[in-house]
């Protein structure tokens, strides 16, 4: 500990392996970025609260008057590095050793490795994740499973892109001058410190995905962090590149502005559909006119999602930026060939639509989906790496299109029960250290689980939260369903798993989150204090 830079404290175990990541020099970069930018992060988080108050008071978002010149201006992002120009199938997954190898070897063009939605940010996952990535960059990453199967990287692997945590999350195990550091700054600083130069020497670069932003001012903060980080580690300005997830309703009104702020460092936008739906619920949760149908009905083809997706493609291509499609939550289904065929066909249809709309690539959740996603883009692109030249001037998007929240029905008991079930199962898994799990044959992560728990909260409070049989959704109805849902979970997983994973604690937290007056901004905030 005496080696730590002044003002830096680590409140967690540091093994000799972890110490290779948590070096004094790497922590000095974390401290430098913290001291330079933490004040701004906190101001921007406070600004989110003010905007929520405005929405609660009935104000509707609109395109910003003060940035009209940016929307109407003639500018583009910096030219893309060669290995970010072709991202037809992009696989994603948590920063887990075996999965990193499988994803990099999957045949996808690119791979987003995730410290965010699909990861429980406990100390071990964060620092072990950094170790794994450091080895992946140097091509030394390997793994041996219990049956003795050896995993190692192929010669040709996907381009690596890292998703640090969003602005709302702290890294509580590291403080600088007595303050917790930002999770995102911590993840980014450690990755850049250990890998950026090595990546440049290997002909690639430090590439990132930036999650859950709500305004272009938040993008400006990331851009300023990139500039200082590049100076500090001694790499040329503009070598960091970042794709921003448009996954909040407020960011959908500032897509041009976000690209503009990051134009030196941008590698496009991604349609983060799951957090986007969650954000719509969160932002309008107290609006008496707002209420969405069962989660399963909110697909990419409902009006507000369609408007968002098409406007994203149009905005990106106007700025010479890639538009990357989001993720279908369907995954391959084992032991049921008929259901599996249906799931694969639905994923294919999702990719066919995105490729036809003009997206330059799209996310898949599983190696078994890479080939079919690739096929759908190859059908549209042929030999071309992307379709950025496809301008969508035919698309016009008004504020009202982005706010056309349909459908409102059906809301059913099965839909309510499914939300409770997914919420409890996901929270239990997250608490046990796994931030991404298959539940009822769907990929569930922090973003999809947010939809489930926020729908339950909202249906209890909205006058429109009425089941198709006429019963109003109430807190008592939800409480009454929790015990039977828990019993179903026990039957599904068996006693051993049921007792190993803290489902009972998850159920308590879920009940409190959905029935108490306060709405937790993110489910991961109260959960993080439990781990
Ligand atoms: C809203 C958003 O933010 S989307 C982005 C965040 N979400 C994600 O990234 C989803 C990542 N996907 C996953 O975590 C997993 O695919 C799950 C949890 C959905 C399903 O996991 P499982 O049921 O374990 O998958 P399954 O058993 O079919 O896996 C088969 C093999 O594929 C591997 N695999 C599955 N998904 C992935 C992945 N995304 N990346 C790398 N390898 C993977 C497994 O490790 C396993 O490897 P093995 O055969 O060598 O042991
Ligand atoms: O991060 C992606 C999303 O859909 O949320
Ligand atoms: Mg997300």
Image (cartoon, helix red, strand yellow):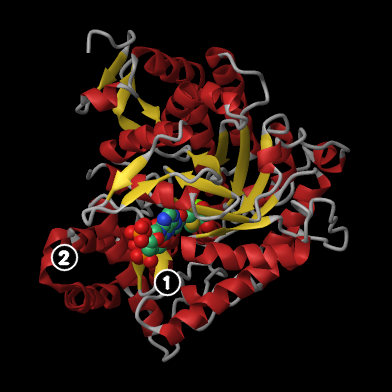
The quarter of the rendered structure image containing the C terminus is top left
Lateral position of residue 456 relative to residue 157, left or right: left
Q: Quadrant of residue 80?
A: top right
Does residue 377 appear in this view?
yes
Q: Quadrant of residue 326?
A: bottom right
Check disc 2 and report the residue beneath it: 497
Q: Callout 1: 10 Å neighbours few (<14), some, many (20+)?
A: many
Lateral position of residue 498 relative to residue 120, left or right: left
Task: Report helix, strand or loop for mark 2.
Answer: helix
**Is ligand 1 less than 8 Å from the beta carbon at label 2?**
no
**Is ligand 2 less than 8 Å from the beta carbon at label 1?**
no
> Residue 76, relative to residue 448: is it above or below?
above
Lateral position of residue 56 relative to residue 243, left or right: left
Q: Nearer the viewer, residue 405 or 346?
A: 346
Check disc 1 and report the residue beneath it: 459
Q: Callout 2: 10 Å neighbours few (<14), some, many (20+)?
A: few
Q: What's the residue at 45%, 79% (across, down)?
A: 340
Q: What's the residue at 37%, 51% (across, down)?
A: 520
Q: What's the residue at 11%, 71% (across, down)?
A: 495
Residue 383 picture location, percent across and down: 78, 56
Residue 270 picture location, percent across and down: 63, 51
Gap between marks 1 and 2 measured at Cα? 31 Å
Residue 246 picture location, percent across and down: 61, 50
């Amino acid at each position: 500990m005496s080696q730590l830079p002044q003002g830096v404290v680590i409140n967690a175990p540091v093994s000799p392996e972890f110490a290779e990541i948590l070096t004094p020099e790497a922590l000095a970069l974390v401290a430098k970025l913290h001291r330079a930018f933490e004040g701004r992060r906190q101001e921007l988080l406070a600004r989110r609260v003010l905007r929520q108050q405005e929405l609660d008071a009935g104000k509707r978002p609109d395109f910003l008057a003060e940035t009209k010149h940016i929307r109407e201006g003639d500018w583009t992002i910096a030219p893309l590095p060669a290995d970010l120009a072709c991202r037809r199938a992009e696989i994603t997954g948590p920063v887990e050793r075996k999965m990193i190898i499988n994803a990099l070897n999957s045949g996808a063009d690119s791979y987003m490795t995730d410290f965010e939605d699909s990861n429980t940010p406990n100390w071990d996952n964060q620092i072990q994740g950094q170790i794994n990535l450091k080895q992946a960059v140097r091509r030394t990453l390997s793994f041996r499973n219990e049956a003795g199967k050896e995993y190692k990287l192929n010669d040709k692997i996907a381009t690596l892109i890292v998703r640090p945590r969003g602005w709302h999350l702290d890294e509580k195990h590291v403080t600088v001058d007595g303050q917790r550091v930002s999770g995102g700054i911590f993840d980014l600083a450690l990755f850049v410190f250990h890998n950026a130069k090595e990546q440049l020497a290997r002909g690639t670069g430090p590439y990132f995905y930036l999650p859950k932003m709500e305004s272009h001012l938040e993008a400006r903060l990331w851009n300023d962090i990139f500039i200082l980080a590049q100076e500090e580690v001694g790499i040329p300005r503009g070598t960091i590149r970042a794709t921003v997830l448009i996954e909040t309703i407020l960011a959908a009104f500032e897509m041009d502005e976000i690209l503009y702020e990051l134009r030196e460092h941008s590698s496009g936008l991604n349609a983060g559909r799951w957090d986007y739906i969650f954000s719509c619920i969160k932002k309008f949760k107290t609006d008496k006119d707002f209420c969405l149908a069962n989660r399963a009905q909110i697909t990419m083809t409902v009006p507000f999602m369609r408007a968002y997706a098409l406007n994203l493609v149009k905005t990106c291509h106007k700025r010479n930026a890639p538009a990357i499609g989001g993720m279908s939550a369907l995954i391959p289904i084992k032991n049921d060939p008929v259901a599996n065929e249906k799931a694969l066909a639905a994923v294919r249809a999702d990719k066919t639509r995105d490729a036809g709309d003009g997206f330059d690539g799209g996310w898949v959740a599983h190696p078994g989906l890479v080939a079919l996603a690739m096929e759908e883009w190859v059908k549209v692109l042929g030999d071309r790496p992307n379709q950025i030249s496809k301008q969508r001037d035919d698309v016009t998007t008004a504020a009202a299109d982005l706010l056309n929240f349909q459908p409102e029905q059906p809301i059913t008991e099965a839909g309510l029960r499914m939300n409770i079930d997914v919420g409890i199962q996901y929270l239990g898994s997250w608490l046990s250290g796994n931030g991404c799990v298959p539940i009822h044959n769907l990929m569930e992560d922090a973003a999809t689980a947010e939809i489930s728990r926020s729908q339950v909260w909202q249906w209890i409070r909205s006058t429109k939260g009425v089941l198709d049989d006429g019963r109003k959704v109430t807190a008592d109805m939800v409480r009454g369903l929790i015990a039977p849902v828990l019993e179903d979970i026990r039957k599904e997983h068996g006693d051993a798993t049921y007792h190993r994973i803290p489902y009972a604690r998850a159920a308590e937290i879920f009940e409190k989150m959905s029935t108490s007056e306060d709405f937790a901004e993110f489910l991961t905030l109260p959960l993080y204090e439990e781990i």
